[in-house]
């Protein structure tokens, strides 16, 4: 997938990194971050393209996957936000949209009146299967890497997330 229009005859990030090195100094962090940000754009565009026919965004897709992974098919909204690493307002917006589409429903927690559960519906499960096939067929947009390369990349990025305090 080419997200850049028009296609350039050179790597603009490599050019910027070289200019950075010449004019500012060490470019290793600038080059890595700029590449990561560009790859994020490429991945987002690919996943969006794969999910669009299924009426889902990546955030809504992730929420459905999370619910499908739970033993009961439901989770407290607070826990969904924690697991998806989203602000409560964002998870509320995602659940509102999924609920409007009939893909999830809100339930009262059986023992805690302060807690709202979100449950994936049969329609949500039905939408999730084809959507998952679509993103998997697109390799989530991660083109040009072998499985070993992707594993190594994931390990490196996990180091950054751990150092940033994403998790213990």
Image (spheres, rainbow, N blue to C red):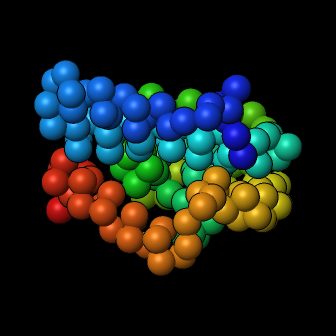
Q: For the view shown, which residue lies furthest in the bottom direction?
A: 148
Residue 163 in sight in this render? yes
Q: Residue at x 76, y 42 (%)?
A: 49
Instruction: Using the rendered view, name the quadrant where residue 133 is placed.
Output: bottom right
As drawn, is 7 to the left or to the right of 166?
right
* Quadrant housing the C terminus: bottom left
Q: Depth check: 56 or 94 in front? A: 56
Could you say where residue 83 lies in the image, as x and y percent from the top left?
40, 54
Any part of residue 88 in sight = no
Which residue occupies 70% across, 40% down? 2
Relative depth, front residue between 64 and 99: 64
Q: Is residue 34 left or right of residue 101?
A: left
The image position of residue 139, as x and y in percent, is: 66, 62
67, above or below 29, in the image: below
The image position of residue 152, as x and y in percent, is 38, 71
Name the residue located 53 percent from the left edge and 51 percent from the top edge: 117
What residue occupies the far top of the structure in this picture? 23
Up the image or down, 69 lies above or below 93; here it is: below
Q: Nearer the viewer, residue 37 or 30?
A: 30
């Amino acid at each position: 997938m080419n997200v850049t229009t028009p296609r350039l005859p050179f790597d603009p990030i490599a050019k910027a990194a070289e200019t950075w090195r010449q004019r500012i100094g060490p470019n290793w962090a600038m080059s890595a971050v700029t590449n990561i940000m560009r790859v994020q754009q490429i991945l987002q565009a690919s996943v969006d393209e794969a999910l669009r026919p299924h009426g889902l965004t990546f955030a809504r897709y992730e929420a459905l996957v999370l619910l499908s992974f739970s033993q009961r098919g439901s989770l407290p909204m607070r826990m969904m936000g924690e697991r998806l690493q989203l602000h409560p307002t964002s998870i509320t917006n995602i659940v509102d949209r999924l609920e409007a589409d009939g893909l999830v429903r809100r339930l009262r927690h059986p023992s805690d009146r302060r807690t709202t559960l979100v449950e994936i519906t049969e329609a949500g499960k039905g939408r999730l299967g084809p959507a998952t096939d679509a993103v998997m067929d697109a390799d989530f947009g991660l083109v040009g890497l072998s499985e070993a390369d992707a594993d190594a990349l994931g390990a490196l990025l996990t180091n950054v997330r751990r150092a940033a305090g994403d998790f213990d």
